Image: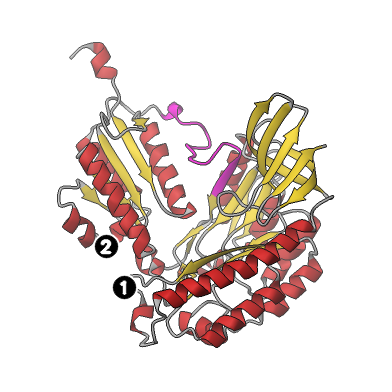
Amino acid sequence: MTPTAEKTAPKISFVSLGCPKALVDSERIITRLRAEGYELTKRHEGADLVIVNTCGFLDSAKAESLEAIGTAMGENGKVIVTGCMGAEPEQIREAYPNVLSITGPQDYQSVMRAVHEAAPPAHDPFLDLVPEQGIKLTPRHYAYLKISEGCNNRCSFCIIPKLRGDLASRPVADVLREAERLVRSGVKELLVISQDTSAYGVDIKYAESVWTPAGGEARTVKARFYDLARELGGLGAWVRMHYVYPYPHVDQVIELMAEGAVLPYLDIPFQHASPSVLKAMKRPAHAEKTLDRIRRWREICPELGVRSTFIVGFPGETEADFELLLDWLDEAKLERVGCFKYEPVRGAPANDLGLALVPDEVKAERYRRFMERQQAISARILKNRVGKRLQVIVDEVVSTAGGFSARGRSKWDAPEIDGAVNLVSRRPLRVGDIVSAKIERADAYDLHGVVV
Ligand code: SF4
């Protein structure tokens, strides 16, 4: 072997599917790979092996995962599978008996063991290959901050607790150290994620840990949603809260939003509004009077934007339940909304509820009516922003004959899932800049404005 050949690092092609939580798992594995000197390649062909991080939440996601594994097997043949779908390996083994290894989510060690076996590292770890903040799959200016794994709830349509186990919160000082490192490395927006952010710390009895912010005094912080939000709010980046449930203690965090410490944005997956459907779904906080709570939050923080997701066509959903949901939408006037047609998930308790299934054509019709209703609400909300000056974080920039055009997001838009603000600017813009823009026009989902 020549000295040059000796130095050649194994190349790994990585496919990351699924939600932001899976993305964080991918980032951790990639960080490990880079730390050990592996190279990443975008092509399966010619790679030493392929890792597929799968999603197993819905049957459609499983189908997508199986397809990705199939492509990797066809184009490469040496494939390691990890992620949510790996927690139930039979389906994968049945379709692709020759995959090298299958592991569940967050099982970084097993993935690395399988990698070492299939493509041993070419040399000793070069830890300095890895930037301080790790390798991120998101653009440099925003990052997902995962504060816990698993979930203590048992929603009947969901198999996540089966796949990922009960809630396991990270010590608060660990989370804060990671957040501070990210901000120091140029991250302008932290997206706080988990399965149930409002439950943060319950499992570790809100354990205190000692955190010393850069240039500050050591202090004891409790692993509680409010305390975490307050500390994150002091780091100088936008802080966006995802997957929160409408519990009374969330009010305190809304006060932080009113003070400007964290973004006035709350991602709450309500899923439905009809009490009987919510009960059948076994949703957390299903008995809360959500409209009253939203009203109260808006009193505390008039700027608040709420985004949510809903499921239509859940077993047992009647026309009356659905109309109640539409009326609720009219009242709630949520800023951003996503909708899914119910799909049974293998292994989910909802399959055994014995409730009448909603026919596909009824689901499709309800989905259409839901989207139409929300589109009108969203258009009205966005129209009200015309003429206002908003802060916008820049995600993409292109230079044009007259200056620059850019795509960014307001405080009420999370990346990937919400709308955008399209900008024109005379002065140069960079990705990650937070600029002030005058809004000139709105359509159903996006705003258009000029940098001032
Ligand atoms: S809150 Fe419900 S839907 Fe979300 S992960 Fe937990 S059990 Fe699943």
Identify the main secondary structure in magenta.
loop
In magenta segment, residue 130: yes
Cβ–Cβ below 8 Å for labels 2 and 1? yes
Label 2 Cα crowd, 10 Å radius (few <14 / some 14-19 / many 20+) = some
Name the image quarter holding the N terminus: top left
Report the residue at 76% width, 74% height from top.
Answer: 296
Disc 1: which residue: 347
- Which quadrant of the figure contains the C terminus? top right
Mark 1 nearby-residue class (10 Å; few <14, some 14–19, many ≥20): few
- Whether residue 155 appears in this view of the structure is no
Residue at horizontal 80%, vertical 52%? 386
Identify the disc placed on residue 305. none
- Residue 339 in the image: x percent, y percent? 53, 66
Toward the left, the furthest residue is 97
Q: Earlier in the sequence, mark 2 or mark 1?
A: 2
314 vs 335, left or right, is left
Q: Amino acid at mark 1?
A: Gly
Assign a secondary structure to mark 1. loop
Specify start and end residues of the magenta stretch as a single range: 127-144
Residue 294 horizontal side relative to residue 89, left or right: right
Left or right: 139 with respect to 259?
Answer: left
Instruction: Please state if 278 lies on the left or on the right of 332 as rendered.
Output: left
Q: Which amino acid, by three-letter code, is at mark 2? A: Glu
Q: In the figure, 176 relative to 253: above or below?
A: above
x, y percentage for residue 354? 35, 88
Q: Is residue 350 magenta?
A: no
Element marked by disc 2: loop
Q: Which residue is mark 2?
A: 88
Q: Position of residue 47 (x, y in %)?
A: 27, 31
